[in-house]
Image: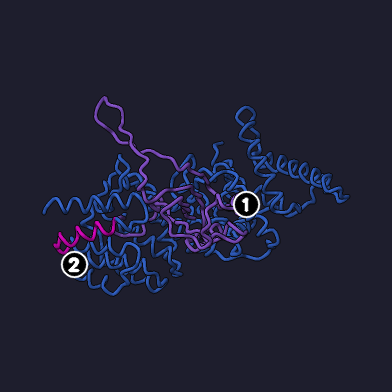
Amino acid sequence: MAKYLLLKHYRGAPAPVNNIPMDKWTPEEISAHIQYMNDFAARLEKTGEFVDGQALAPEGQWVRYDGEGRPPVTDGPFAETKDLIAGWMIIDVDSHERAVELAGELSAAPGAGGRPIHEWLEVRPFLAAPPTIPECAIHG
Amino acid sequence: MDEAQLRSLTPGVLAVLVRRGADFAAAEDAVQDALVEAVHSWPADPPRDAKGWLVTVAWRKFLDAARADTARRRREDRVDDEPPPGPTPSADDTLQLYFLCAHPSLTPSSAVALTLRAVGGLTTRQIAQAYLVPEATMAQRISRAKRTVSGVRLDRPGDVATVLRVLYLVFNEGYSGDIDLAAEAIRLTRQLAAAIDHPEAAGLLALMLLHHARRAARTAPDGSLVPLAEQDRGRWDTASIAEGIEILQAALARDRLGEFQAQAAIAALHADAPTAEETDWVQIVEWYDELTRLTDNPVVRLNRAVAVGEADGAQAGLAALAELDDSLPRHTAVAAHLHERAGDRPTAARLYAEAARKAPNLAERDHLTRQAARLNAYQ
């Protein structure tokens, strides 16, 4: 019972095996890809492991505080930003192994030629609440 | 009757339906529906016999659902309106429900969800909120769990250890949302300990009560973690401690020691100390030795090193730690603590910062970062 974030990148992840950009696929291949993602989420809902899934637009701005009474400063987007997150799925699973297994399945979504993309996904554990019975004597 | 009292009737009512021949999954749904109706109608019109009311309403709901189901499948098989007379359900029936909901064929998260619903009487929505997942996800988790155990016969006792493990997991989840899972776990463990004569069920109940007693003192008003040595012991719940110790002593007297009794004994020694300095660390080390014999758990060895550091000095603690695999979770945090006790602040500060980066939860990470910052302020 731990939550994991599966992160999908527009850029910044290592190159996938089937590395043909989406705009070079056939419309049917794109539909098959989207269908795979939807089916994956639906299947996780059925197994009781789905928490959330969202896609992000590639555009984004940097924002920071600029002092009392002043509007925040905005800047960007910066072309040199290395990591560009495309979306995520949050899962709630019994083990780290299960999280890795599911990320592997998600990475097998079909791309050009109907072959799996083998896209790299990042698996990040959530920081949970501390257990009621402390696991470490120094915290008691 | 408050909600907890209402929910305490759940397993008994469910057992009646199952004894009358309803299958577990359908009976469980019917009991849930009856509980929802009770919450709505009882405040205005409380029944004289609460359990009898629930049985009647749940049985009617079960029949309605069975008929609708039969109609849908265009089958001729019928369910009798008149319930067959069966033996009166007893504590054993409640016990069988615990075994079923913690059946080894279930994953831990499924067993937890099913136990909270079928034995605890919580709604799917409440369980989903407590575990911060969508209600639809939790509904699927529960119905999947019910399908998994649908073929299991309720005629043989199960393994108490698996039930205790599930209740321990519920307790450890603590508090989030409207439902206090720690309090719920105590309620369910208390019910179990009353239904079964088992020292480890008593041991787990004692362990929960002793830890629950410290809850108010464990966090500062800003939510940060207060370590045991710095807790305001005046804020510990003395009634809960007294009850935990009494239950533990009765269990220990049975001379069938188990993991939970040993853990509770350690918690009791902490609870017994009027100040942190007066803690009987020598006895605590002995209990950790006992625990190591019972379960060869690396977490136990790690905590034993902390206790050795208190009983025999920091150098002895560091020597005990040196025998353990340094990739263990919290190994670095313990090393930092022992180095500080040994007077080596720079090393402790560096290790606290490193431990913070590896902390498994936010409260511990913040605590360890503060420890590093505190020591760095000296330099």
The residue closer to the viewer here, A117 or B125, is A117
Residue B264 numbered tag: none
Q: Which residues are magenta?
A: B341-356
Query: In terms of secondary structure, where does tag 1 sit?
Result: loop
Q: How would you rate the neighbour count of disc 1 (Cα within 10 Å): few for under 14, some for 14-19, many for 20 or more?
A: some
Give coordinates of residue B330: x percent, y percent.
32, 62
Q: Looking at the magenta stretch, what is its main secondary structure?
A: helix
| B43 to B232, vertically: above or below | above
The residue closer to the viewer here, A106 or B48, is A106
* In the image: residue A46, left or right of residue B289: right
Give the purple chain's letter: A
Residue denoted by label 1: A26
* In the image: residue B346, left or right of residue B107: left
Give the chain letter at badge 1: A
The residue closer to the viewer here, B25 or B138, is B138
Give coordinates of residue B25: x percent, y percent.
69, 52
Query: In terms of secondary structure, where does tag 2 sit?
Result: loop
Give coordinates of residue B221: x percent, y percent.
30, 39
Which residue shows up at 54% across the image and 59% down it? A117
Residue denoted by label 2: B313
* In the image: residue B379, left or right of residue A30: left
For chain B, give the colour: blue
Quadrant where the C terminus of chain A sits is: bottom left
Q: Residue furthest right?
A: B76
Which residue shows up at 74% across the image and 52% down it? B22
- Mark 2: amino acid: Gly
The answer, for residue B70, to whether it is visible in the render is yes
Which residue shows up at 43% across the image and 56% down it? A13
Q: How would you rate the neighbour count of disc 2 (Cα within 10 Å): few for under 14, some for 14-19, many for 20 or more?
A: some
Q: Is residue B179 magenta?
A: no
Do residues under tags 2 and 1 come within 8 Å of each other at their CB atoms? no
- Mark 1: amino acid: Thr
